[in-house]
Amino acid sequence: MDPRSAAMIALYLLLGAVLAVFVGPPVVRRLKHRGLPEVVPRQHDFGKRRVTFRLALKLLEERGARVLVETGTARHGLEKPRSDGASTIVFGAWAHRHGAKLHSVDLSPDAIEASRMAVLEHELADAVALYVSDSIEFLRSFGEPVDFLYLDSYDYSRTDAEIQRRSQAHHLQEFRAIEDRLHDRSVVLIDDCRLAGGGKGKLVVDYMRSKGWTVVKSAYQVLLAKQ
């Protein structure tokens, strides 16, 4: 090998080492810090929901949660965790690992059927019960104390003020429908809060704070508990 070729190879090796040190680790860290390896494979990116999901799961474990309730079923399994959150699989997987049960309700039969397929695919049928119902009526008739409540129904609009008001009012009504089955160790998580017009949680967060609930984390989602 001539000296010039050897020098070129050495230069390429040096550049590769530099990239591995200065580029590789941040990429790995970004992937690592977007996943929820506690419950689902590491490669899934939960983006803006990751911090509050992790905090919620930590509180559920610390408080021994066994009955989880979700309004607004995630219908895409783990295919779109950055956009729809994949909450049914996330909390279903946690319930499966901890001997708990997730009860998820949605008004759309199509959403429930799609979610049912995802639940079966991830082998979580023993830990997830799915219901087609109006969420407020479902919550009013729910017969058990609730350890964790996740509010994510009535799609919100970034531009339509009337839809924003209806969504906010709906989420407040949901909370009030189940309020008497929440207790001092219950945890509540509300999705889609950091949006124009105040997001889904605008009314319900203020109401909960007036009733003694504490905001644990306010980000794209708002996490509340009694402390």
Image (cartoon, rainbow, N blue to C red):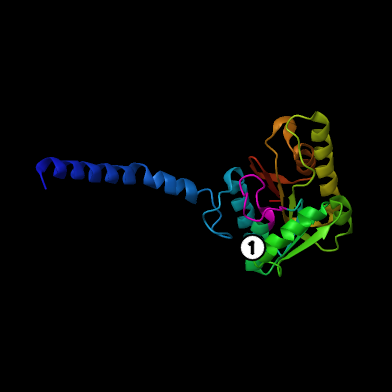
In the rendered image, residue 201, in percent from the top left (x then y), is placed at: 75, 40
Badge 1 local density, few (<14 within 10 Å), some, or many (20+)? many
User: Looking at the image, which residue is at 70% across and 39% down?
Assistant: 193
Furthest residue toward front = 1
Which image quadrant is residue 218 in? top right
Q: Residue 87: say if magenta.
A: yes
Position of residue 68 measured from the top left corner of the image (x, y, whole percent): 73, 60
Q: Is residue 5 shown in magenta?
A: no
- Which residue is labeled 1 in the image? 93
Does residue 199 lie above or below 51 as drawn? Answer: above
Residue 64 in view: no
Q: Main secondary structure of the magenta part?
A: loop
Is 16 positioned to the left or the right of 189 in the image? Answer: left
Vertical order, 169 against 96 (above or below): above
Q: In the drawing, does residue 100 fall left or right of residue 130?
A: left
Q: Nearer the viewer, residue 11 or 203?
A: 11
Front in this rendered view, residue 172 or 82: 82
User: Which amino acid does the dot numbered 1 rest on?
Assistant: Ala
* Residue 27 screen position, x and y as percent: 43, 45
Q: x and y percent of residue 188 in the render?
A: 72, 50
Check disc 1 and report its element: helix, strand or loop.
helix
Examine the image and state in which quarter residue 160 appears: top right
Q: Which residues are magenta?
A: 74-88
Question: Looking at this rendering, what residue extends furthest in the left direction?
Answer: 2
